[in-house]
Image: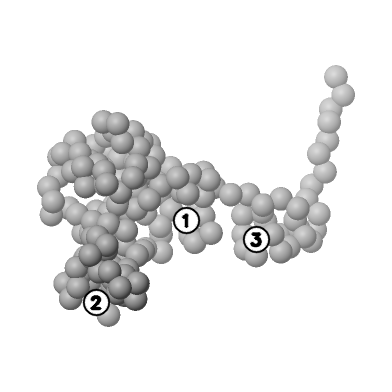
C-alpha cells in the first residue's frame, strides 16, 4: 500500500482556532464542542461553586474546551428529563459556574431545583436565578416604552437578581 503524505500547513495560515476568525489566509475555521452546542442552551442560573464538585458528585467527565471568549470547563448531561450544561470560562469570576438548559424558561426553576436536589446542595449554592447576561432593568425599560409593564416577567427593580448576581461574584459596581 502506498503511503499517503499530507503536506504541512502553508506558512501564512493562522491557527484555525484563533482570532481573527475567517479573516486570515487559513481556509479552515475550527470551533469547539461548546461553540457547537451553546446555541441550544439558555442560561437559567449561576452556582456559587465551580463545575468540578458537581461533576464529581454526578460522576461526569469535565471537558476542557474553548470558544471565542476563552478556555472553559463544561459538562453536558441529562438529569430527570432535563438537558443541562454547566460551564466555567477561565476569564469568568472564580468560584462560579453557569447553568444552562435546553427546555423553555417556564421549566427553569423546576430544572434548577432538580439539579440542587440530586447534587445534594441547597439554595445557598445558587448565586443567581435567570440569565445573567440579561439586565432585568433593560427589560423593564423596554416594557415601559411599550406602555405595558404588566407584560414583563422575572423583573424586580432596585434589588434585582442582576444586582444580586453582581454582588455574588464580587462585582458591585
* Residue 149 vertical placement versus 173 (above, below): above
Q: Residue at x 30, y 40 (%)?
A: 55
Residue 124 visible in the current orientation = yes
In the displayed structure image, the side of residue 80 where residue 159 appears, left or right: left
Q: Position of residue 136 (x, y in %)?
A: 28, 68
Task: Give the number of the disc on residue 21.
Answer: 3
> Label 2: which residue?
172
Identify the mark nearer the N-term, 1 or 2. Answer: 1
Q: Secondary structure at mark 2?
A: loop
Depth check: give the residue in front, 8 or 36: 36
Q: Earlier in the sequence, mark 3 or mark 1?
A: 3
Q: Residue at x 34, y 76 (%)?
A: 145
Residue 11 lies, with reference to residue 40, above or below; the image says: below
Mark 3 or 1, closer to the camera: 3
User: Considering the numbered disc 1 on the image, is that residue within a helix, a strand or a loop?
Assistant: strand
Mark 2–mark 3 CB contact (< 8 Å): no
User: In this orientation, which residue lies closer to the viewer: 147 or 76?
Assistant: 147
Residue 156: image x %, image y %? Answer: 19, 68
Amino acid at each position: 500500500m502506498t503511503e499517503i503524505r499530507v503536506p504541512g500547513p502553508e506558512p501564512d495560515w493562522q491557527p484555525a482556532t484563533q482570532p481573527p476568525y475567517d479573516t486570515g489566509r487559513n481556509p479552515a475555521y475550527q470551533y469547539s464542542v461548546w461553540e457547537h452546542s451553546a446555541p441550544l442552551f439558555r442560561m437559567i442560573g449561576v452556582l456559587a461553586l465551580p463545575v468540578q464538585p458537581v461533576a464529581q458528585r454526578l460522576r461526569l467527565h469535565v471537558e476542557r474546551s474553548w470558544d471565542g471568549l476563552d478556555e472553559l470547563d463544561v459538562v453536558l448531561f441529562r438529569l430527570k428529563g432535563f438537558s443541562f450544561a454547566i460551564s466555567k470560562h477561565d476569564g469568568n469570576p472564580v468560584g462560579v459556574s453557569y447553568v444552562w438548559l435546553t427546555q423553555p424558561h417556564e421549566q427553569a426553576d423546576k430544572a434548577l431545583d432538580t439539579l440542587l436536589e440530586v447534587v445534594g446542595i441547597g439554595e445557598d449554592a445558587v448565586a443567581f436565578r435567570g440569565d445573567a447576561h440579561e439586565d432585568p432593568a433593560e427589560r423593564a425599560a423596554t416594557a415601559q416604552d411599550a406602555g405595558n409593564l404588566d407584560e414583563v416577567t422575572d423583573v424586580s427593580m432596585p434589588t434585582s437578581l442582576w444586582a444580586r448576581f453582581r454582588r455574588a461574584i464580587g462585582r458591585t459596581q
